[in-house]
Amino acid sequence: MTLFETQDASPPSQDVELLAVEAELLGIKDGRDRFGRVLRDTIDQLLDGERTGRFDPEKLFKTEKTHAGTLVEINLQREFEFANGQDMDYRIAGVDVDCKFSKDLGGWMIPPEALDEICLLVWADDRKSLWSAGLFRAETSKLTQSGTRTRKGNRDKKLRLNKENLHLVRWLWHNVELTENILLHLPTNIRDRILASSSGQARINELFRLVQGRRIGRGTVRTVARQLDYMARIREDGGTSRARPRLRQEGIIILGEGLEHAVIAKELGGPVPQKGEFVSFRIARAQPHHAAKPSTYLWGDHWVVADPDDPVEELLLPLPKREGGRKRT
């Protein structure tokens, strides 16, 4: 359980089908982490930063926001290979389950055909960097009128699960950390400095130069680079202008997923990059005044995350490989 996750007590249930679906979902290997990655990737898919440069979900068109629920439903099915439902979206543990997504906690709309069915309720908020997923039997007595109207002015027949009834949801995972949308949360002046250059490579270099000690996802890299070969902008090979060799001249390392880099990040006391993520650090050789800082052993010496007033130490060689490490990104 992460610092950001609060596992609210779920209400007791005698609903055999709901409990069977719950057990099936909670039994999926790495289910929570995979679920969170699907939501992060789906939001990034909607933003389409590589082509549009967008990073704020509020900038999505109305039709795109409407399409969000469909994309979440599709991407979850692809990730977990849920069978098609007979009448609902999925069939899980032999039970029909309808998937409902909302950007507002307590904003799920339940159509007439889903009444009395089990719903997988999904919520994600890019500004709060949180997501939740839970199960709910959509009984009419637990729902309220939506109050929405069709173009002709007639009330539609959808019902809403309000915030007041959130205690009725059996949470699978509640208020879990959503991988941060870095560009959305940066101070405006820092974000403007990163995006100022007309060169995708220069923007990537500035991203890892200015945003250190924070996990940066591929969606952010893609949006900043705005190039099809965005990953090539980071790698060691391909010239000294690439982010890793260029920033090594400033004493900055860029860690990616994989065992080798995870160990270094952990030893430095910083966040550990997960699948599809990167973390940069400016490092310095350990000195007596660094005695209280965690360190890692590289190039025959001990290194720490540099203090602001530590001099820049150019790193002449790429990060050494460690025995038993996996291929780095």
Image (cartoon, helix red, strand yellow):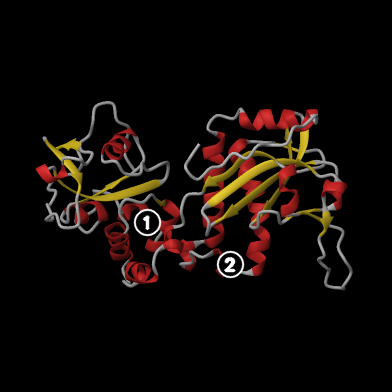
Q: Which residue: 87% across, 47% down?
A: 141
* Residue 287 visible to an observer of this rendering: no
Amino acid, disc 2: Leu
Residue 284 image position (x, y, % from top left)? 15, 47
Q: Is residue 298 left or right of residue 219?
A: left
Q: Give the residue pinned by disc 1.
A: 230
Image mark for residue 60: 2
Query: Dot 2, how many residues are within 10 Å of its Cα: few (below 14), some (14-19), or many (20+)?
Result: some
* Residue 8 visible to an observer of this rendering: yes
Q: In the rendered view of the protein, which quadrant contains the C terminus?
A: top left
Where disc 2 sits, the SS reads loop
When the figure is inspected, residue 17 is found, relative to residue 205, above or below; the finding is above
Q: CA distance from mark 1 to mark 2?
A: 23 Å
Residue 55 image position (x, y, % from top left)? 48, 64
Q: Which residue: 63% across, 57% down?
A: 103
Residue 274 image position (x, y, % from top left)? 41, 41
Q: Is residue 329 left or right of residue 317?
A: right
Amino acid, disc 1: Tyr
**Which comes sooner in the sequence, label 1 or label 2?**
2
